[in-house]
Image (tube, rainbow, N blue to C red):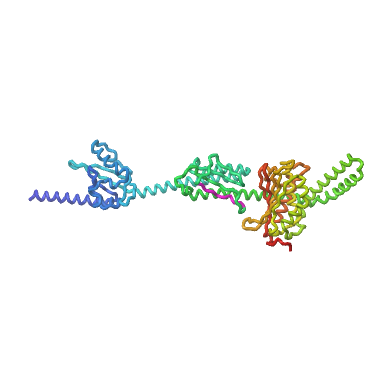
């Protein structure tokens, strides 16, 4: 009886130990899986059930490779067989990071440590698995934030350097070229990016630039008008080719375009202040000395006229008198232009037709146009709305533009030529949803060199000889048009054409849709 009780006690203790061990295994936080040497699952604790989505009943007796994604699933039995044959360990006794396949097909990461136990002639492998999905997500989020932080630093640095370029005071072409190169440095792989800055019809791009379907563009808007844009292109097809640019990258390019626009607006404003200062100085000069010059000048002209009459029988001496009169008249014209600045408000505004203004000017200039062998075309519709203006001043503007066009045509074509053409056109159009009239004078003459474009309206600036031009015609015209709330713009290509647009607002306090004289 004693031996029986002893055996029963041992059996009970063994049972209790097994139960105790089973309870520990089942309550473990980590997944615990045991397999035999063929790979069949013998035990699958509750944590493993939660981890893989299977119940123990669904997996016990099945090959453990059902819990593995490819290619590990296909390779596992080969590795296990090799270990049985060679005894060479690759993973047993080590902590490794692997991936498991959930019942729903989701693949997740875990850390695994495998131990081996021999029970008689059997080998049992026990794997303890710790799900590291949350840790992985946290690490990936940290990595993403770190990458984003680096990216933002690159973008901020790039924007700062762009600001330095803009503040450098260089001319616009050089600024655009430098900005185009600088924008690339804001991207993780500058060599994969092409950039171009377009401004006023010119394009300034980096050496590697080419247009691709994977691009973004930000407009350079100055005073509500598009003057250019900043474009960034992926040179090769990006991974996310549907929308390869991050919102922050789009914001950066928009900020650069806005910075360029702000600089242009500031420069334009400064230029206008300088121009206004020049005009004010000329106005003061005209008001102060214009009449003082005119009085003795009239005396010189009168005396020259008397000499011309007296010296009829002395041709050589008479030539000098005529030269005196010619030069005095040229001075008188200069003074007259100067005086225009100080008395622009004498004539009142009244409704006028552009066609009448054009006809009045052509009545005085047709002979000169014909003498230069210029073919003239005029397209000014009769039904254009009237514009409130000072007609005589607008005639002066048109006359100045025609004279300049004739000089340009004569420079290119000293004699008659089929290409010696002058076009005068007028149209109604809209600018920023406002109605305007546009009068255009276009010649196919020598054109205007780009280097001169910025100075066209400067007082006393001229490319003509002293005998031909005073440098006041365009400056006076610009002042007149601005006084009417309008503007003069220029298009030109050297050696091909020059096109001057005079834009006058129709809503400058008076508007009429009728072209009929009241």
In the foreground, 47 or 253: 253
In the foreground, 73 or 495: 495
Q: Is residue 134 magenta?
A: no
Image quarter where the C terminus lies is bottom right
In the foreground, 231 or 506: 506
Residue 485 seen in render = no
In the foreground, 441 or 208: 441
- The correct choice, above or below, for 434 with respect to 310 in the image is below
Residue furthest out toward the left? 1
Q: Main secondary structure of the magenta part?
A: strand
Q: Is residue 215 magenta?
A: yes
- Residue 22 position in % (x across, y down): 22, 51
Q: Based on the displayed image, in which of its 4 quarters is residue 239 positioned?
A: top left
Residue furthest out toward the front? 418
Residue furthest out toward the bottom? 518
Q: How many marks?
A: 0
- Residue 390 position in % (x across, y down): 74, 57
- Residue 326 position in % (x across, y down): 83, 45
Range of residues picked out in magenta: 214-222
- Left or right: residue 343 compared with residue 102: right
- Left or right: residue 278 compared with residue 306: left
Residue 467 seen in render = yes
Q: Residue at x 47, y 44 (%)?
A: 237
């Amino acid at each position: 009886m004693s031996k029986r009780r002893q055996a029963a006690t041992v059996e009970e203790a063994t049972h209790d130990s097994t139960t105790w061990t089973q309870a520990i295994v089942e309550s473990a936080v980590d997944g615990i899986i045991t397999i035999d040497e063929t790979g069949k699952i013998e035990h699958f604790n509750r944590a493993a059930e939660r981890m893989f989505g299977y119940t123990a009943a669904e997996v016990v007796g099945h090959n453990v490779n059902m819990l593995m994604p490819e290619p590990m699933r296909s390779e596992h039995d080969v590795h296990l067989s090799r270990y049985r044959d060679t005894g060479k360990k690759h993973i047993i006794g080590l902590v490794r990071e692997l991936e498991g396949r959930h019942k729903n097909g989701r693949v997740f990461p875990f850390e695994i440590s495998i131990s081996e136990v021999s029970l008689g002639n059997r080998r049992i492998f026990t794997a303890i698995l710790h799900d590291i999905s949350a840790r992985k997500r946290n690490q990936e989020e940290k990595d993403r934030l770190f990458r984003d932080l680096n990216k933002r630093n690159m973008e901020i640095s790039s924007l700062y350097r762009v600001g330095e370029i803009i503040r450098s005071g260089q001319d616009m072409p050089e600024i655009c070229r430098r900005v185009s190169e600088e924008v690339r440095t804001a991207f993780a792989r500058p060599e994969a990016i092409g950039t171009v800055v377009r401004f006023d019809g010119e394009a300034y791009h980096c050496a590697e630039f080419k247009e691709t379907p994977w691009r973004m563009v930000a407009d350079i808007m100055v005073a509500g008008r598009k003057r250019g844009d900043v474009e960034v292109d992926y040179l090769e097809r990006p991974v996310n080719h549907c929308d390869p640019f991050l919102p922050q990258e789009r914001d950066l390019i928009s900020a650069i375009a806005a910075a360029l626009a702000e600089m242009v607006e500031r420069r334009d404003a400064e230029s206008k202040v300088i121009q206004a200062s020049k005009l004010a100085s000329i106005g003061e000069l005209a008001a102060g000395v214009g009449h003082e010059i005119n009085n003795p000048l009239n005396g010189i002209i009168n005396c020259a006229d008397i000499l011309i009459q007296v010296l009829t029988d002395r041709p050589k001496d008479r030539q000098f008198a005529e030269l005196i009169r010619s030069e005095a008249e040229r001075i008188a014209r200069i003074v007259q232009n100067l005086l225009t600045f100080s008395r622009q408000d004498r004539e009142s505004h009244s409704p006028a037709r552009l066609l009448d203004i054009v006809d009045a000017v052509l009545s005085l200039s047709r002979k000169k146009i014909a003498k230069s062998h210029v073919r003239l075309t005029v397209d000014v519709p009769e039904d254009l709305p009237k514009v409130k203006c000072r007609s005589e001043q607008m005639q002066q503007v048109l006359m100045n533009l025609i004279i300049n066009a004739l000089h340009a045509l004569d420079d290119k074509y000293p004699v008659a030529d089929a290409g010696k053409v002058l076009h005068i056109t007028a149209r109604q159009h809209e600018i920023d949803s406002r109605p305007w009239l546009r009068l255009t004078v276009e010649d196919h003459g020598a054109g205007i060199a780009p280097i001169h474009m910025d100075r066209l309206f400067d007082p006393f600036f001229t490319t003509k000889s002293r005998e031909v031009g005073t440098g006041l015609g365009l400056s006076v015209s610009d002042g007149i048009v601005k006084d009417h709330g309008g503007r003069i713009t220029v298009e030109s290509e050297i050696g091909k054409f020059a096109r001057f647009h005079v834009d006058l607002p129709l809503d400058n306090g008076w508007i009429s849709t009728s072209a009929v004289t009241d």
